[in-house]
Image (cartoon, rainbow, N blue to C red):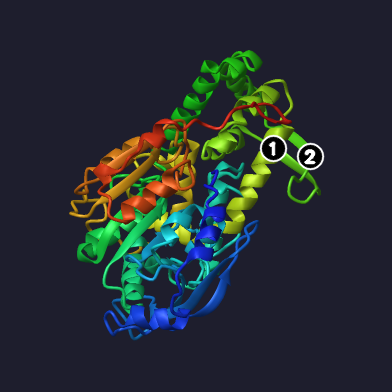
Amino acid sequence: MPFFPAVVALACLLLMAPSVAPAEARDEARAGATGSARLALSDCRLRSEGAPGVSARCGTLTVPEDYAAPGERGITLRVAVVPTLSAHPGEPLFVLAGGPGQAATDFYSAVAPAFGFVARHHDVVLVDQRGTGGSQPLKCQLPEDPVASQASLAQLEALSRACLRSLDGRPAFYTTSVAVRDLDAVREALGIPQLSLYGASYGTRVAQHFVRRYPDRVRRVILDGVVDPSTVVGATATADSAAALAKVLARCAANARCHATFPDPAADLAAAKARVGARPVAVALADPATGAPRDVTISDDELSGALRLLSYSGASAALIPLLLHSAAAGDFRPLAAQVLLYGQKLDAHLAYGMHLAVVCTEDAPDFPPGSATSADRQLAALAAMCRPWPAGVRDADLRAPLRAAVPALVLSGEADPVTPAANGARAAAGFAGARHLVLPGQGHGQLGTGCVPELMAAFLGEAAASALDTHCIDRLRPAPFFLDYAGPAP
């Protein structure tokens, strides 16, 4: 997604900032609020590929793998605090990453400029959720985007079984219901009496369940790309993705320049699907990341998977009509390049073992009957991969409607292929004083879109969600479509 360029403004603020206590003294002052701190922090730098890095204070906290047996195996959580330079900071903001399977430190270091306004007045606390990043990661090798791969359901089940056997950890204890206890343990160890939460995608499930368990310890919540309690991940993925794609193609048809260049993008989609539906298309190309020769086979599953992932971001969705037009004419190389790029990103940033530990405990039991043999490839593949996994810790009220007297800012994209705006509407109904913003033409995750960073900072300050001036949202426009491979239309 495009991130708001707050770096220059923040640099000016640093030049004018009042003198503040050294980091160690601020750590001690923060801990003194409750006198219970037991998490030592030291200087560190958070890094993510392609990002400049973020200075932080890092430490580790040991917690039980199984809270019901605290004397048995312990695991280490990686914790990072990005200190504010404010002499009078507000409550800390805990940032919860998506996936499930992405580490909070990886996520934040990649998107830090989008938190520039928030970081002026709030410490940002990052806890790699158990099973990710530096917190006992549950990583294993699976095909790039395994659900969209050409592996049979039996092969996917075998791969999943091998993944399970390779893990150093008991996946039954790497679920949302356990992770919220970790967050509260970190809160206590840092001596924080009350916090706010920002959750992205799956992180919104964690945020809402934390509010359910610990409502008095939460001041405010921001949910971005919402998995509300009733959402069953994977159950409606194919329909949600198709609906988002239809919106992208309709927007092209309604745009004069896009329509003139691609007169019928829906027909291009049908033609591309017909080509790969008759027989998968073999494509030889240079790997867009390394330049090495690669052979890629595009089946209907790969085509659907690539279009779903391209729809996540407004910037990449702007490529879709052009890619489909090329594919309809028989040139699948540009689309194959996108398949490779997105598959590599997933493999680099997603802990598949933790992903399956969560989905197979929290979602698969609620798949509709017949999912294992469903014509919906996405659903059948997930069901097959979950078959070997043990039932994990799942609180009985995980899916119950949430009712919380906590102010919430809820963000949705109009063309989100994975967490549609209806999810956000349901989630907002569970909070007192909630405000649900649906950003026109946008995909999954609104963190860096337009004026959203300023709105988040205002909300975490003193503004009630209902009082936020959101006229800037009305002026947002989706990224312009690419009319050729030279770049987007002006």
- Three-letter amino acid code of the residue under disc 2: Leu
The percent coordinates of residue 283 (x first, y second) are: 75, 35
Count of numbered marks: 2
First in sequence, mark 1 or 2: give its number.
Answer: 2
| CB contact under 8 Å: marks 1 and 2 | yes
Residue positioned 72% across, 40% down in the render? 296
User: Is 149 on the left or on the right of 461, as rendered?
Assistant: right
Residue 158 appears in the picture as rendered: no
User: From the viewer's perspective, is residue 378 above or below residue 77?
Assistant: above
Q: In this rendered view, identify the residue nearer to me: 426 or 469.
A: 469
Q: Secondary structure at mark 2?
A: strand
| Disc 2 crowd, CA 10 A, few/some/many (<14, 14-19, 20+) | some
Q: Position of residue 46 (x, y in %)?
A: 56, 68
Question: In the rendering, which numbered label is found on residue 336?
Answer: 1
Q: Residue 47, relative to residue 285: is it above or below?
A: below
Quarter of the figure with residue 40: bottom left
68 to 267, vertically: above or below: below
Above-or-below relation of 26 to 278: below
Name the residue carrying label 2: 285
Relative image position of residue 359 (x, y in whole percent): 41, 54
| Of the pair 334 and 3, the residue shown nearer to us | 3
Can residue 312 be spotted in the picture?
A: yes
* Circle 1: element type: helix
